[in-house]
Amino acid sequence: MRHPSRRLAAAVAACALALSGAGACRGKPKAPDVRSVIEDLKSGDEEKRGRANLDIWASGEDARKYVPELIVMLQGADPAHRAQAASTLYGMGARGSDAVPALAVLLSDPDKELRIAAAMALETIGPAAAEAVPALIKALKDPEGRVRQRAAIALGNIGPAARPAVPALAEAAKWDPVRGAAEEAIRKIGGKR
């Protein structure tokens, strides 16, 4: 039989290991705090950014607590941080709906990659992105085909609330790279086609 102090030392070591991330002694493991996850999203280390995204995406409805900081990133001066925030919001879907106004602003950013990322995030937010319909209609005339395509998909995913976009989608459907997405969006909105 082991000495009681050795068993206690082993239990303490197991708890220390668990608290370091390998599990938990009691209850649920402590969720990472918002500030540290956001700092990891801003990191130059791709692995840290990936883990931060996974932490956010895996947090279920708690992911909403990250949205205010993601909005700050979307509105910041660093294009890499803005793109990272839009990418993170893409993975959050409707849980990122509070960021819709900031994403709508990004649809007119000079950087085409940011415009694409913003449209893709709005695409996954779905019906909760209805507030962005005017900006998405404008994006259907973007010089970059991928922006137009993603805007059409986002409008389709918004559904009936995007009905004002049907004429613009019909016009966009005349362009080969966007045709399929625009026609599908019209069907999803309920504008026939």
Image: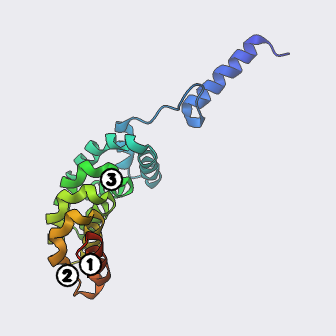
Mark earlier in primary sequence (2, 1)? 2
* Secondary element at tag 3: helix
Position of the C terminus, as image quadrant, is: bottom left
| Mark 1 burial class by Cα count in 10 Å: few <14, some 14-19, many 20+ | many
Task: Point out residue 168 in the picture as x, y percentages from the top left corner.
Answer: 16, 77
Q: Is residue 113 visible?
A: no
Q: Which three-letter amino acid code belongs to the residue tagged 2?
A: Ala
Q: Mark 2 = which residue?
A: 170
**Residue found farthest to the right:** 1
* Quadrant of the image occupied by residue 127: bottom left
Give the answer, above or below, for where 174 lies relative to 95. Answer: below
Tag 2 near tag 1, CB within 8 Å: yes
Residue occupying image coordinates x 23% and y 46%? 72
Task: Point out residue 111 in the picture as x, y percentages from the top left corner.
Answer: 22, 67
* Secondary element at tag 1: helix
Q: Mark 3 = which residue?
A: 94
| Mark 3 burial class by Cα count in 10 Å: few <14, some 14-19, many 20+ | many
Q: Which three-letter amino acid code belongs to the residue tagged 1?
A: Ala
Residue occupying image coordinates x 82% and y 16%? 2
Q: Mark 1 = which residue?
A: 182
Distance from disc 2 to disc 1, alpha carbons, whole Å, reads 7 Å
**Residue found farthest to the top:** 4
144 lies left or right of 64: left
